[in-house]
Image: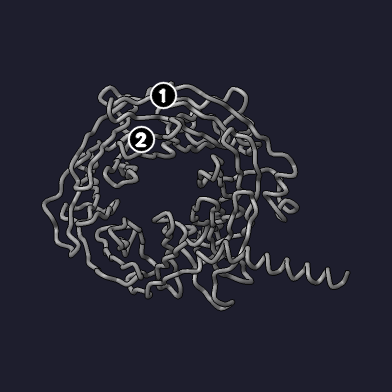
Amino acid sequence: MGHYSKAMRLIYIIYFSCLHSVYFCESQNIIKSAPDYLFNSKANITWCGKIAKENVFSLSKNESENKKVYVQTYSDEMQVLQSFKLKPKSRKSRIIHTLAFDNHVLLLTKKHDIFKAKNTVYIEKFAYNGKPLGNPAKIAETPLKSYKDDGEFIIDQSPDKSKTLLFNTDYNASGEFSMNITVFDGDGNLLYDTSLVPGYTNDNVDIEEIQMDNGGNFYMLSTEYLDSVYHKIPSKYKHSIHYYNAKDRTMSRLIIPSENYYIKQATFLVDPKHHKIIIQGFEGSEESDKIDGMFHCEFNLETPALVQTKNHNFNDSDRIKFLGNRVYYFSSDLKDYYIKNFYPFENGKTLLVAEKYYTSQQSTNYFVNGTMQTTYRTIFIYNEIILICLDSAGNLCWKEAIHKNQSTLNDDGIFSSFTTMVLPDRIIFYYNKLDRKSSGIIEVTVLANGKMIERSLSSSAEDETMIVPVESRQVAKDQMLMVTQENKNYSIWKMRF
């Protein structure tokens, strides 16, 4: 019996080792670029496109000014091929976005003119040697709503990069809340622009999310605040999905129903194959800012009509699972969770991902020559990630949590939160371990059945490399680019799966 037991243990160890290699061997291929002096602590690094086998990054040395950017192209082996500086030709404008195409780079620049009371957006075209191709072209203009109005625009690109959407909200000549839509092609040529009145009862509206398809149609999630005080907590609001048909130039608004529950947050997936929009989010009491459960509903785009609705309440065991050890030291209420991602999974499943995030303000008083001075600091706190998997009918498959404790000071949380790699049968999460006792890059693989496997990507306990999650992203179905920092030098990792 003893020999049998040892044999079984040996088989188990071999099986687990094989299982571990099956899920991790593909992600072992990591190619790292050499640290670059342009990647300093004040750099704003953005992946702006893939051309052939090259990846293109734009780098802004000072994010607050955005007066110029450095563009670098990397080979398939992450060697720098080109590096050049772009400076807008449009006077007194700042760069708001960089788009890479096969033969040129497009800069979107914005001029904030308080004397003429308007914000103007230009497109500027450059070759891959930094040489301007033509003059700046004006593509959008909005009046200033106030002296401090900076004319915030939302930018989204179709999956095939053939169309780029520039979106902002405004007021029309009648004083009605309106949406301005500008769509241009890869050469910067205007395809169409229009202004629509969505019919809100007031102008306290947040545009939460926009997705555009290859046909130029786009889908948008909005939150309309119904309180007299904007962003009052707990707030009363109404969520809507908008569908813009590029061919007919019409917009449909579908109000997300909440007869049996009160919606706190929502997100959506577009399923063009089945002509529907899948919407999920958190629900709770109208009188509290905590969440009590989640909902799932679907809209048929051809009708359009509500197809089905499902609700799932969170119980005490869910709270313990989500909060982990913190449930014994803090309130067990589920608060300060924000939806971060909504993924399609295998066999029609979906995975809703949310993260606990909040900030804490601290002040310190001291005296200089008898005069009291005050310093302020902001603590950025990113804790557990909660994962909820539903099947295609909205039925619950499983709920899990990835426990982490990230707390940083006055850094805007640049090294906090997480980034993901989505594969057909699993989703991989990456984040920095920011404990006082240890650090490192953590990889957590979540399988379709809810099983999670964790490992460290750090080479040693002394390895101080950290990822910048907000700038790291999946760039192909089998590739991810991860921006990392060590000793205030940035490097880019290419991970093949």
In this rendering, does residue 75 appear at all? yes
Query: Label 1 crowding class (10 Å Cα cut-off): few <14, some 14-19, many 20+?
Result: few
In this rendering, does residue 228 appear at all? no
Residue pictured at 57% horizontal, 63% vertical: 22
Q: Is residue 342 above or below residue 486?
A: above
- According to the picture, the residue beneath numbered tag 1 turns out to be 302
Task: Name the mark on residue 218.
Answer: 2
Image quarter of residue 121: top left
- Farthest left residue in view: 134
Query: Label 2 crowding class (10 Å Cα cut-off): few <14, some 14-19, many 20+?
Result: many
Q: Is residue 398 above or below residue 125?
A: above
User: Front-most of 414 and 250?
Assistant: 250
Identify the amino acid type marked 1. Answer: Glu
* Residue 372 horizontal side relative to residue 388, left or right: left
Look at discs 2 and 1 and give the one toward the viewer: 1
Residue pictured at 23% horizontal, 56% vertical: 102
- Residue 100 % position (x, y): 26, 55
SS assignment at label 2: strand
Identify the amino acid type marked 2. Answer: Phe
Residue pictured at 28% horizontal, 54% vertical: 98
Quadrant occupied by the N terminus: bottom right
* Residue 451 horizontal side relative to residue 358, left or right: right
How many numbered dots are placed on residues in this image? 2
- Residue 147 % position (x, y): 30, 41
- Residue 73 % position (x, y): 28, 65
User: Front-most of 482 and 64?
Assistant: 482
